[in-house]
């Protein structure tokens, strides 16, 4: 690919040609994550803001010259990306902010942000002639891979913890993947999946391992900036598990800055759950992120439950290099955020998606943001992904349905007791 200079190791800085390495820098076990380095002069001759104005490709592929993909590659038919960016005056007023937008990646084909990465994985796997693609996942990356594989008749094997929400497991089974429900955590599933790739030679889509997943995820940063007329926001709030999404947003923003399409870098605000706060704690206490041992992760937001965040180097750099912050929220805050966000905007988020909004609420509370900041909150997953979580959330705010006999009198008795509609 003419647009790529090399793959560079985030630990030792060593550079590789794309064909030279499979996934990671061979010098550091599983931790040597590689970053794709681009030739921006070359890219600047292939794509421009003006040309994008005339593009009628409303998917991640509108940015093809910025992706690690051959121009002629076969791309999956499912429509991934170009999700809506909704302004919310109501929430802005509620939080004393001037400008707030919700980017809704619950609107992706398999209902989470992970479709952005899995779409790129499909193309890269095909490029290698892979017979089988595999991933470990808390659920959404798996569902994304599963759906995108179905769209291209691509065999795949999935590893998820047996505790994954039913809806996510249902997606995998409906799309026809071979599914392993691992009796253990996401971390256990990840290790088992890595062993399987080494044993069977399956193509490895794993987050924080395959260098191209960041490249798919960065498209959300392009969309946010383009949807705001290339006037970059001041801050972007996003929840963090492995750290691949926040690292991807950072990468996308760096690309745009290098191309001079935006004139400042937004501050990235990473939100972690208190029960899965590996990166938050390492950032706050200045711990060594490479050697820090795994923690015991447990949170209602299953998609950000990661005992050993695989993309923690990129996640930490995203916050430190943009002057952002990590924020830690309790499960009760996350659950509270689900109906609050939904009732103000109509966007129904799964717990990990709502966590980003909970992080904004906390940041406002702690005066980490200014009322003048232009703020984007990223909803990363659809609320229908986790009905148990949603029902817990409405129970927490004491919202109950009315059970009624199929009779107008019985109905009137209930309605008579209401103060207002
Ligand atoms: C995966 C995921 C996240 C976190 O992304 P990481 O790259 O693991 O930090 C957040 N929300 C949802 C809904 C997800 O599926
Ligand atoms: Zn290295």
Image (cartoon, rainbow, N blue to C red):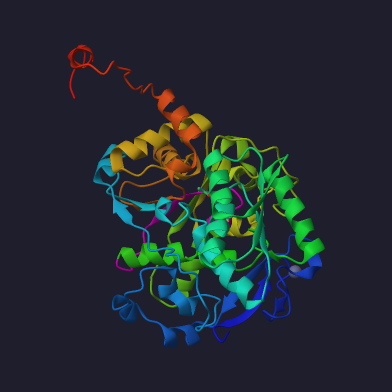
Residue 197 drawn above or below residue 243: below
> Split into 4 quadrants, where in the image is the N terminus?
bottom right
Compared across the picture, whether 61 is left or right of 133 comes to: left
Q: How far from the left and from the top, in percent, is residue 33?
A: 68, 64
Q: How far from the left and from the top, in percent, is residue 179?
A: 66, 50
**Residue visible at 48% across and 86% down in the picture:** 41
Q: Give the extent of the magenta segment.
A: 229-245
**Residue visible at 52% across and 66% down in the picture:** 119
Q: Nearer the viewer, residue 269 or 171?
A: 171
Name, please, the residue furthest toward the front: 406
Q: Is residue 92 magenta?
A: no
Residue 381 shows in this picture? yes
Residue 336 drawn above or below residue 26: above
Count all numbered tags in the image, as a single digit: 0
Q: How far from the left and from the top, in percent, is residue 145?
A: 57, 59
> Split into 4 quadrants, where in the image is the C terminus?
top left
Q: Nearer the viewer, residue 146 or 235?
A: 146
Residue 320 shows in this picture? no
Q: Quadrant of ligand 2?
A: bottom right
Q: Quadrant of residue 274?
A: top right
Q: Nearer the viewer, residue 246 or 13?
A: 246
Q: How far from the left and from the top, in percent, is residue 166?
A: 55, 39
Q: Is residue 230 magenta?
A: yes
**Residue visible at 65% across and 58% down in the picture:** 313
Q: Quadrant of residue 24?
A: bottom right
Compared across the picture, whether 156 is left or right of 359 comes to: right
Q: Nearer the viewer, residue 178 or 60?
A: 178
Residue 389 drawn above or below residue 197: above
**Residue visible at 56% across and 64% down in the picture:** 214
Residue 149 drawn above or below residue 292: below
């Amino acid at each position: 690919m003419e647009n790529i200079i090399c793959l560079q190791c985030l630990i030792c800085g060593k550079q590789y040609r794309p064909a030279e390495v499979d996934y990671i820098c061979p010098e550091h076990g599983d931790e040597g994550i590689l970053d794709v380095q681009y030739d921006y002069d070359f890219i600047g001759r292939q794509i421009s803001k003006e040309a994008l104005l005339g593009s009628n490709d409303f998917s991640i592929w509108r940015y093809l010259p910025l992706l690690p993909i051959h121009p002629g590659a076969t791309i999956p038919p499912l429509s991934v990306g170009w999700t809506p960016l909704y302004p919310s005056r109501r929430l802005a007023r509620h939080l004393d902010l001037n400008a707030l937008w919700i980017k809704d990646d619950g609107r992706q084909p398999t209902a989470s942000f992970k479709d952005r990465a899995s779409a790129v994985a499909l193309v890269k796997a095909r490029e290698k002639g892979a017979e089988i693609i595999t991933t470990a996942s808390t659920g959404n990356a798996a569902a994304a891979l599963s759906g995108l594989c179905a769209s291209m008749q691509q065999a795949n094997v999935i590893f998820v913890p047996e505790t994954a929400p039913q809806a996510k497991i249902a997606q995998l089974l409906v799309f026809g993947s071979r599914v392993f429900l691992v009796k253990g955590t996401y971390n256990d599933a990840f290790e088992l999946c890595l062993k399987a790739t080494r044993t069977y030679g399956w193509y490895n889509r794993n987050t924080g391992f395959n260098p191209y997943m960041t490249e798919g995820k960065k498209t959300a940063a392009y969309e946010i900036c383009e949807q705001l007329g290339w006037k970059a926001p001041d801050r972007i709030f996003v929840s963090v598990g492995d750290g691949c999404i926040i690292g991807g947003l950072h990468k996308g923003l760096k690309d745009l800055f290098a191309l001079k399409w935006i004139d400042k870098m937004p501050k990235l605000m990473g939100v972690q759950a208190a029960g899965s706060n590996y990166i938050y704690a390492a950032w706050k206490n200045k711990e060594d992120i490479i050697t820090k041992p795994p923690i015991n992760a447990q949170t209602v937001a299953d998609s950000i439950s990661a005992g050993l965040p695989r993309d923690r180097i990129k996640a930490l750099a995203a916050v430190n290099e943009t002057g952002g912050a990590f924020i830690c929220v309790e499960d009760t805050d996350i659950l509270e955020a689900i109906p609050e966000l939904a009732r103000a905007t109509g966007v129904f988020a799964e717990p990990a998606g709502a966590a980003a909004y909970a992080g904004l609420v906390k940041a406002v509370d702690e005066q980490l943001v200014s009322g003048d900041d232009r703020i984007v909150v990223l909803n990363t997953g659809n609320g229908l992904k986790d009905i148990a979580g949603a029902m817990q959330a409405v129970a927490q705010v004491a919202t109950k349905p009315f059970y009624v006999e199929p009779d107008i009198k019985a109905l009137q008795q209930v309605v008579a007791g209401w103060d207002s509609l």
